[in-house]
């Protein structure tokens, strides 16, 4: 039996927007992933949870404009803890140029902007960690 993809997901900083990240968390669970939803957290707590939970993926939600500082800080701190293999995903409302810079210059594996189909997010996450998606039982 293949193990489940382990995801730690959080809202960055004091962001009060919860609906999107909550729905993504539920979708990932429904797709067969093991999800630990942290709510609002700062990089130190997110990285500690990734370490404790043996995460494959860290998902970050940002709708309050802190994505260019706190997102890269999570990536940097994961590296300092020897967790370079953990893929960091981010979602939220931001300028497309910011999303591109996060991916190309700041170590975010992938940024999903609003209206990204959930199936695309799930497919990308499974492919990035090389763990096959479980097939529904007939």
Image (cartoon, rainbow, N blue to C red):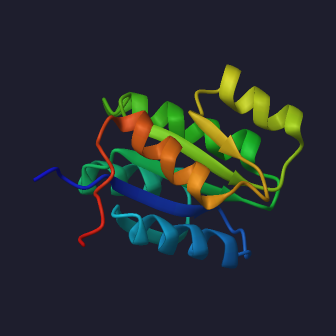
Q: Kindly identify the residue that appears in the image at 50 percent across and 47 percent down.
A: 123
70 versus 76 height, above or below:
below
Q: Kindly identify the residue that appears in the image at 87 percent across and 38 percent down.
A: 96
Q: Is residue 59 left or right of residue 110?
A: left
Q: Is residue 5 left or right of residue 67?
A: left
Q: Quadrant of residue 111?
A: top right
99 versus 26 height, above or below:
above
Which part of the image, by quadrant, shows the C terminus? bottom left
User: Picture coordinates of residue 44 (x, y %)?
Assistant: 47, 51
The residue closer to the viewer here, 23 or 63, is 23
The residue closer to the viewer here, 3 or 88, is 3
User: Picture coordinates of residue 125 (x, y %)?
Assistant: 47, 45
Disc tally is: 0
User: Picture coordinates of residue 57 (x, y %)?
Assistant: 41, 46
Q: Name the residue at the left extreme.
A: 1
Q: Is residue 91 left or right of residue 89?
A: right
113 versus 107 height, above or below:
below
Q: Kindly identify the residue that appears in the image at 34 percent across and 33 percent down.
A: 83
Q: Name the residue at the front extreme.
A: 138
User: Picture coordinates of residue 59 (x, y %)?
Assistant: 52, 53
Q: Kindly identify the residue that appears in the image at 46 percent across and 36 percent down.
A: 77
Q: Is residue 16 left or right of residue 7?
A: right
């Amino acid at each position: 039996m293949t193990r489940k993809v382990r995801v730690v997901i959080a809202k960055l900083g004091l962001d009060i927007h919860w609906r999107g990240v909550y729905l993504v968390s539920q979708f990932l669970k429904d797709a067969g992933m093991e999800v630990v939803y942290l709510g609002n957290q700062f990089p130190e707590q997110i990285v500690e949870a990734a370490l404790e939970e043996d995460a494959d993926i860290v998902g970050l939600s940002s709708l309050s404009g802190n994505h260019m500082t706190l997102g890269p800080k999570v990536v940097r701190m994961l590296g300092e803890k020897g967790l370079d293999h953990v893929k960091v995903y981010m979602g939220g409302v931001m300028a497309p140029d910011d999303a591109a810079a996060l991916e190309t210059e700041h170590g975010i594996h992938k940024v999903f902007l609003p209206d990204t189909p959930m199936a695309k997010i799930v497919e990308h996450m499974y492919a990035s960690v090389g763990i096959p998606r479980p097939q529904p039982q007939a």
